[in-house]
Amino acid sequence: MKKFKLSIALITLSLFILATFSGCEKPIDLSEYLTELKYQSYANQDCEYVIKANYGFIEDNHVTDGKVGKKTNLLTFKLLDRQTDNVTYTVSLDFNGVNYKSNFKLSPVSHSLVAVIEINDFNLNEFEITLSHSSENVKTTLTSILPENTITYKQALTHLQTQQSQLIASYIDQDGRFNGEIAARILVKDEHPYWYIGLCDKDGNLKALLIDGFNGEILAIRQIF
């Protein structure tokens, strides 16, 4: 009889625990509120031209309004050691049996030559491109510069959510929705990765955070405007 009562008690306790945890709300998945993401970064070392690239996505017709719209996956190249002149530089590459090509144009933001290719599911750590101008075609290989054990953007957002719970809670409305948008970009300096995270509310107020790309520690928080 004692064993029977003990079994009933254990079953009751188990059901109570299960009901308690099932009633708890899951943390918000902040990755669903990304309007800009750059999670891979490349550079070349075997060419007279200095070329860098990154891959991710950005919201179409992006406006900083605290809302998330349709997004496009982009592979973006920067030609860093060339000035604008009468020469048109073109980058091309093959991926999954398709040839992609784009001309470099002067970016008003970075003041460097930038070429953008719309491409989905780009998952290479190393790839070859052809840089063309006039009658010259130069091949070079771009390789990921992310150090081993770099945390992913989802891990960075989890660290943010854990370490800055009150800040994240300030963006959540009464219906449990994150009332804002997020930008996340991977940066590598002196072989050390960092995640830049931008939090923007519906009024356009932006907070910028810098997160260590190895351990997820939040290194800096700044109110932009």
Image (cartoon, rainbow, N blue to C red):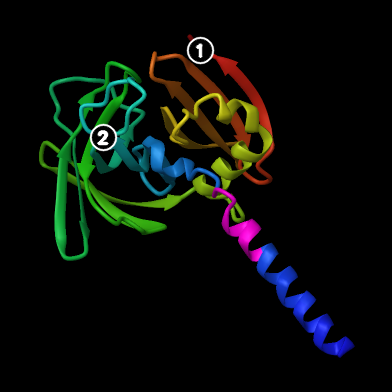
Q: Nearer the viewer, residue 106 or 200?
A: 200
User: What quarter of the picture does the N terminus occupy?
Assistant: bottom right
Distance in Å between CA atoms under marks 1 and 2: 23 Å
Element assignment for label 2: loop
Image x and y of residue 121, in percent: 29, 57
Based on the picture, tell me whether residue 217 belongs to the magenta stretch: no
Element assignment for label 1: loop
Image: 195 above or below 1: above
Label located before the other in sequence (1 or 2): 2
Residue 146 visible in the shown view: no
Q: From this viewpoint, which residue is outermost toward the top?
A: 225
Q: From this viewpoint, which residue is outermost toward the right?
A: 2
Q: Amino acid at mark 2?
A: Gly
Residue 55 visible in the shown view: yes
Residue wearing tag 2: 69
Quarter of the image for residue 183 reads: top left
Q: From the viewer's perspective, tell me whether residue 219 is left or right of residue 89.
A: right
Q: Nearer the viewer, residue 145 or 197?
A: 197
Q: Nearer the viewer, residue 133 or 173?
A: 173
Q: Nearer the viewer, mark 1 or mark 2?
A: 2
| Residue appearing at x 14%, y 56% in the figure | 99
Q: Which residues are magenta?
A: 18-26
Q: How many numbered tags mark residues here? A: 2
Q: Nearer the viewer, residue 203 or 208?
A: 203
Identify the disc placed on residue 45: none
| Residue appearing at x 20%, y 32% in the figure | 104
Residue wearing tag 1: 224
Q: Amino acid at mark 1?
A: Ile
Image x and y of residue 210, in percent: 59, 29
| Residue appearing at x 37%, y 41% in the figure | 54
Image x and y of residue 141, in percent: 35, 53
Image x and y of residue 90, in percent: 17, 39
